[in-house]
Amino acid sequence: MTAFDIMRIFVPATIAFLFGIGITPVITHFLYKYKMWKPKGGKMALDGKPAQIFNSLHQSKEVGTPRFGGVIVWVSVGFTALLLQILWLIFPDAFEQLAFISRDQTWVPLATLLAGAFVGFIDDLYEVRGRQGISLRYRLILVAIVAALSAWWFYDKLGVSSVAVPFGAGLLNLGWLFIPFFILVALFIYAGGVIDGLDGLAGGIFAVMFGAYAGVALFQDQLDLAALCAAIAGGLLAFLWFNIPPARFYLSETGTMGLSLTLVVVAFLTDGLGGGKGVLALPIIALPLVVTVLSNIAQILSKKVFGRKLLRVAPLHHHFEALGWPSYKVTMRYWIVGVVAAIIGMTIALL
């Protein structure tokens, strides 16, 4: 690793951050001018009844705060990737090493970021127009389709059919089962996207996770992938600048769907293909998302089996709110846990 390699990571991150900061006033003006928020606050629980505790905490906040904040992230990343690619074409000697669009490292994560962002954008559009958004069932189907296409690319184009296993055991060859395994991982991580429920929470957590994988890819000499992860982290920090309490907008589906799918792709790219253990480290680096999903599952099982709720409200971060924790305290403590988990996960990935 050289100083120039590190610069290849910092330059995209800086460009994405500055561009995101620059476009936010324009996007914010548009979102508030056209009232791009839910016309009616509140949500329904999984049993079809109003989520009373959640609604008492958040119903008033959902009206008047726009959705579509994720646009800042993926537009910033797309602009950064295209800018450096164009500069490379115009000035090949000066920008050859900074352009990070490549077939073997960044095509798939860029594609999943944009595909997920597009589907999420449509869902957000339905929400702000007063219609029911894309149902959870259909969103899961769409996520599964995007994940299946990504898994096929790994399996057929990149020749990947195995994942790293712990304790120095090498790689576990899954054969064609690699594709359904990839889809299941993608669905699980996407389900953790409901962490986008408190001001600054999702933006900070996703920035930490992509920052961690930027470090993993850098140490594995996957410099294009590291640059992309750094650019995503930079775009997220620009979003977070305006999302800390009181939030100017929410990340919403156009952010969380693309980001969660891309996180999974990055984890698989930093696995056996990169000589690391990116998939094995994913549950640790993405610990806040994993805990979010498990708390929802535990709540549902407790209701079904014991007839009572395990948590006052699920997922877990809303349970802490219901206990009386201020939202900023929940957010900051999640950030701390996320950073510690990311450090441990990076260590596992690189062992």
Image: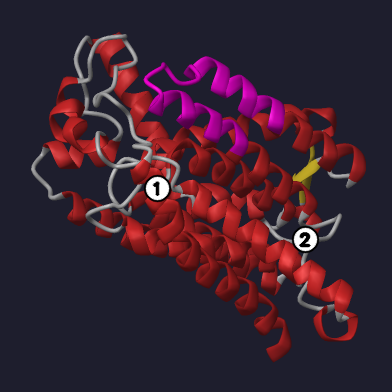
Q: Which residue is at 62% across, 20% downward?
A: 141
Rendered position, 68 above or below 126: below
Q: Which residue is at 61% across, 41% downward?
A: 261
Q: Is residue 228 left or right of residue 18?
A: right
Residue 128: within the magenta?
yes
Quarter of the image with the N terminus in it: bottom right
Does the rendering let one see residue 2? no
Which residue is situated farthest in the left direction here?
A: 324
Q: Which residue is at 79% across, 43% downward?
A: 162
Between 228 and 273, the residue placed more toward the observer is 228
x then y, percent, for residue 277: 67, 56
Rendered position, 2 above or below 261: below
Q: Point out the stretch of residues depicted in magenta.
A: 118-146
Q: Secondary structure at mark 1?
A: helix
Q: Which residue is at 51% across, 47% downward?
A: 283
Q: Do the CB atoms of the residues marked 2 and 1 lie less than 8 Å apart?
A: no
Q: Is residue 298 left or right of residue 284?
A: left
Rendered position, 8 above or below 283: below
Residue 65 image-quadrant placement: top left
Which residue is situated farthest in the bottom direction here?
A: 3
Quarter of the image with the C terminus in it: bottom right
Residue designated by label 2: 274
Sooner in the amino-acid sequence: mark 2 or mark 1: 2
State the separation of the CA atoms marked 2 and 1. Answer: 25 Å
x then y, percent, for residue 15: 59, 73
Does the rendering let one see residue 70? yes
Residue designated by label 1: 288
The prevailing secondary structure element of the residues shown in magenta is helix
Q: Which mark is residue 7?
A: none
What amino acid is at disc 1? Pro
